[in-house]
Image (tube, rainbow, N blue to C red):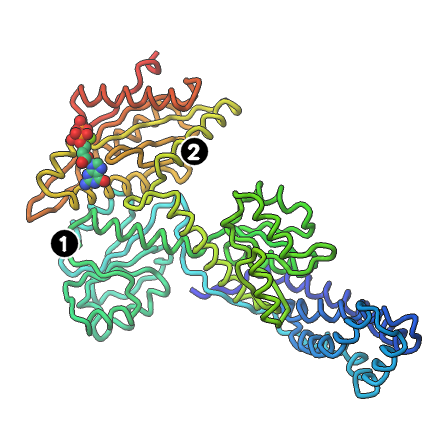
Amino acid sequence: MPKSLSSDVRKKLETLRNRFRDKTIGDIQGLVTNIQNASQRSEAVNELVAAYQLLHRLAGSAGTLGFTQLGEQARKLEVAIKPLAEQVTEGADSECIRLQLQQLLDGGYEHDISSLGSFLGVAEPVSAQWHNPKRAEADRQSVVLTLEPDHQLNDLIMQGLALYGYQVRSLSSGEQWPDGMNDVDLVMIRDTLLQNEGEIWLSKLHSLPVICFSSTHDFITRYRLARLGVDACVDEPHDIPALVDRVEQLLAEGLATLTGRVMIVDDDKELLEHYRLVLSSGGLQVRALDDPSRLLSELADFRPDILLMDVQMGQYDGPVLARMLRFQSEWLSLPIIFFSSEEDRDLQLDVLARGGDDFVTKPVSDQFLVRTARIRCYRARQLDKLVSLDSLTGLLKHALAKTELNREHARCARYGHSSVVAMLDLDHFKQVNDSYGHGTGDVVIKALSNLLRHRLRSTDIIGRYGGEEFVLVMPECVMNEAVEILEALCQDFARLVFNAESAEFSVTFSAGVAALNAYETGEQAIEAADKALYQRKRAGRNGVTVAAGDLS
Ligand code: GH3
Ligand code: MG
């Protein structure tokens, strides 16, 4: 749903704008003096450099802060004076520069400079809006709305989804979209309901993800559904594990494209604060830094998805900082995007060659800033995931799960809290593969990982340890609690019905648990949980066993 800026953010943006206006009035007075001095005395021509730098800064920042006309005029004046400022830095003859300036001023530049301040009276209203589609907050039960005319099928879907911890609501066809449905996260709808009046229906769904139940495969129908905004088509909604898999993907994607961690570095304090406000109100986590010399320590502390940086920051040069960051392998893949008012494409390419990834040309509109940051954060995390997440289940890969486990072990030692580690393994899984094929086996593995992801806390660590073996770390959790949670999961997983070759079957899993904090190393805790798991296997599977050392 398009969401306007909250009045609090709007007020802050207005305050910033006023601060910029006040400061710029003084800056422009200084600019006029600089130009006058340079035009009157050849010893003062070096003041042209300060004048050029100010115009360059205004051209980059004024538009972003709402003074588009001022920014455009400053750009025009900047371009005109640039050759003279360059002559000054190259040490050309002062008197010759002074005469050229005089000529420029006589040709109308003097009038333009003195009337620059009048553009401070023309600002766009603070009214940026950006799309903030609904997002399921972490740890809140996701709400799914179903519109399926077949009552029996609808009941089956509702019960199946409830097992995974979704809250499910239903609406029958013809029923109006009731008030108070603002918490719905995803909609499932039968294709027949999308005929004729269906278009009106979908318009009510705003930007919610939509799964359509449809067994029609022809191009025209599918194209029409895609045009209506349907995100996924499912043939057989009674296959609950497959359906949940789709739901999980869509919800995770929706959430992921809206969140991200952005670090911004700019020495212009107003501009920096403006970027920070805009990005945070767009739902991103932001760390703003006006002192580039703290870049390395802040990066290590904040670990952003992307880094946005100005090209010129006082004594520091953005591209040089980018190159310096690449000295450390840890930051080799961090996307670095420069804010630049440079229109010189060659210079931009040069900067890219020195370690940057892309440019955003100043002035940057609020909407563009939020959208570009979201997309780039999402892409960056997708790439990161390819490296660290298991492709079948989306869970942490073995090595990363172990690293996280060791980190939690260290935290337990430092803060003295209790955490639990669990090893899980599917029971008689070889038989599943042998009877129904490897593909069906994969569906079962995915179903268990979805169940775990959905039912455990977002702070829990879930890894695919081996083929059909999983590792869990439950931080700040006592043993009784962990056993209770895992036993409930065992029972619910056993109730899931899988479909293959017109046969229905169920699968169970076993778990072994150990108190992470009770062992000297994370490795020893894993071994203890693994032993407990095999005790469980011998004791009849489908349940949870606590490591022997932890029972006392
Ligand atoms: P137990 O209850 O004692 O754990 O018996 P089990 O049959 O589950 O154990 P076993 O270790 O004999 O078999 C595990 C099977 O899991 C063998 C292997 O082919 C299968 N497997 C491992 N990784 C995957 C995978 O990614 N997909 C599929 N479909 N099967 C896998
Ligand atoms: Mg097994």
Q: Nearer the viewer, residue 11 or 44?
A: 44
In screen coordinates, is 5 left or right of 42?
A: left
Query: Which tag is nearer the camera, tag 2 or tag 1?
Result: 2
Point out residue 151 in the picture as x, y percentages from the top left corner. 14, 56
Q: Is mark 1 within 8 Å of ligand 1?
A: no
Asked which secondary structure carries label 1, the reply is helix
Figure quadrant, ligand 2 = top left
**Within-10-Å neighbours for mark 1: few <14, some 14–19, many 20+:** few
Q: Which residue is mark 1?
A: 153
Q: Amino acid at mark 1?
A: Leu
**What SS does tag 2 mark?**
helix
Task: Compare residues 539 and 146 and report the one nearer the observer.
Answer: 539
Q: Position of residue 154 (x, y in %)?
A: 17, 54
C-alpha distance separating marks 2 and 1:
41 Å
Residue drawn at 64 percent across, 68 percent down: 341
Q: Is residue 306 left or right of residue 146?
A: right
Q: Amino acid at mark 2?
A: Glu
Looking at the image, is 217 positioned above or below residue 152? below
Q: In the rendered view of the protein, which quadrant contains the N terminus?
A: bottom left
Residue 166 vs residue 66: left or right? left
Q: Which residue appears farthest toward the left when viewing the image?
A: 502
Q: Residue under label 2, please give it.
A: 404
The answer, for residue 323, to whether it is visible in the render is yes
Badge 2: how crowded within 10 Å, few (<14), some, or many (20+)? some
Residue at (87, 82) in percent of width and height:
99
At horizontal 15% and vertical 55% (from top left) the residue drawn is: 236
Name the foreground residue: 117 vs 157: 117
User: Residue at the spot x=65%, y=57% of the render?
Assistant: 272
Q: From where the camera sits, is residue 427 visible?
A: no
